[in-house]
Amino acid sequence: MLSKVLGAVGAVLLIVGVVLAVRPVHAGGDGCGSVFQPDKGITPMQCDARLSSRGTLVTGFGAGGVALVVTAITVAAVRDRRTRVSP
């Protein structure tokens, strides 16, 4: 059960990270684009801070999601191994 909960929370964090990455950023009425694809040309200075902070959020959600999914897989593998090894 623990591995399923960890896997589900990890998947949700990954999805939130992707949504934040593709969602456009706006600063002072200007469209800045998204983390994956900033607007072409010269972007206003206020876009730099917004894109940077959004990139940090995306990285945090992605790393947290991956860590939880890996932990879920590890917990499931250890639990499976213990049930096979125990007499």
Image (cartoon, grey):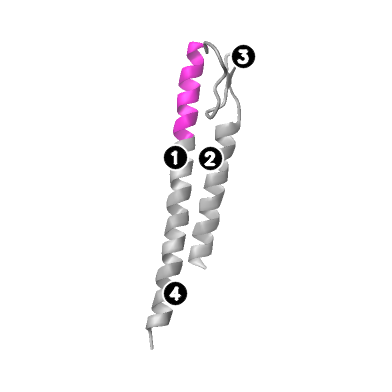
Q: Is residue 50 magenta?
A: yes
Query: Is disc 4 surrounded by few (<14), some (14 to 19) or many (20+) residues within 10 Å?
Result: few
| Residue displayed at 54% across by 22% down | 38
Q: Amino acid at mark 3?
A: Gly
| Residue displayed at 53% across by 29% down | 36
- Secondary structure of residue under mark 2: helix
Q: CA distance from mark 1 to mark 4?
A: 30 Å
Tag 4 residue: 80
Tag 3 residue: 29
| Residue displayed at 46% across by 20% down | 49
Q: CA distance from mark 3 to mark 4?
A: 54 Å
- Please report whichever mark, 3 or 4, sits nearer to the chain's N-terminal start: 3
Q: Amino acid at mark 2?
A: Gly
Looking at the image, residue 53 lies above or below residue 58: above
- Please report whichever mark, 2 or 4, sits nearer to the chain's N-terminal start: 2
- Please report whichever mark, 1 or 4, sits nearer to the chain's N-terminal start: 1
Tag 1 residue: 60
Q: Please report contact status of discs 1 and 2: CB closer than 8 Å, yes or no.
A: yes
Q: CA distance from mark 3 to mark 1?
A: 27 Å
Q: Please report contact status of discs 3 and 1: CB closer than 8 Å, yes or no.
A: no
Residue 82 drawn at (x, y percent): 39, 77
| Residue displayed at 49% across by 36% down | 58
Q: Which residues are magenta?
A: 44-57
- Secondary structure of residue under mark 1: helix
Q: CA distance from mark 2 to mark 4?
A: 30 Å
- Please report whichever mark, 1 or 2, sits nearer to the chain's N-terminal start: 2
